[in-house]
Amino acid sequence: MQLLFTELTVFVLAIFVGFEVISKVPSMLHTPLMSATNAIHGIVVVGAMLVAGAAIGGAVGHAIGLAAMVLATINVVGGFAVTERMLEMFKGKTGSK
């Protein structure tokens, strides 16, 4: 029970710290930061695959590992989509004078 409470405390504190850090970033730095976090989330996908492969707890462990892989993959794909849209904003208008 103590370990669960400690892990939940760290998780909640990480949410607050992450929100404060991200909210202070100027808009011009969002695209480079998104590219870096996409690389980090790629590592998260690999970790999720390792967890799913070595799952303890039988079918429930494998289901949790699969859910982690799906959510991490959605996060990576969404991050690349957002980065692409942000880069489109910085491109010049072609064909117009």
Image (cartoon, helix red, strand yellow):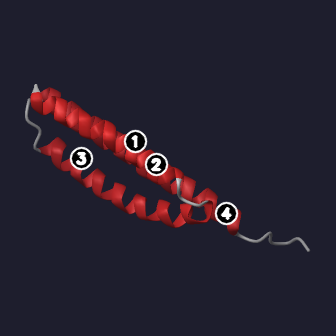
- For label 2, the residue is 20
Work out how far the residue at label 2 is from the one at label 4, CA to CA, in angstroms.
Answer: 27 Å
Where is mark 3, residue-wise? Answer: 48
- Residue count near mark 1 (Cα–Cα under 10 Å), binned few <14, some 14–19, many ≥20: few
From mark 2 to mark 1, how far is it between C-alphas?
A: 6 Å
Residue 8 picture quarter:
top left
Residue 4, above or below 46: above
What's the residue at 17%, 44% (across, down)?
51
Of circles 2 and 3, the one toward us is 2
Q: Earlier in the sequence, mark 2 or mark 3?
A: 2
- Disc 1 secondary structure class: helix
The reply to whether the C-beta atoms of the residues labelled 2 and 1 are less than 8 Å apart is yes
Q: Earlier in the sequence, mark 2 or mark 4?
A: 2
**At 34% across and 40% down in the image, what residue appears?**
70
Looking at the picture, tell me which residue is in the foreground, 31 or 19.
Answer: 19
Q: Is residue 96 above or below residue 10?
A: below
Mark identifier at residue 88: 4
Q: Which three-letter amino acid code belongs to the residue tagged 3?
A: Ala
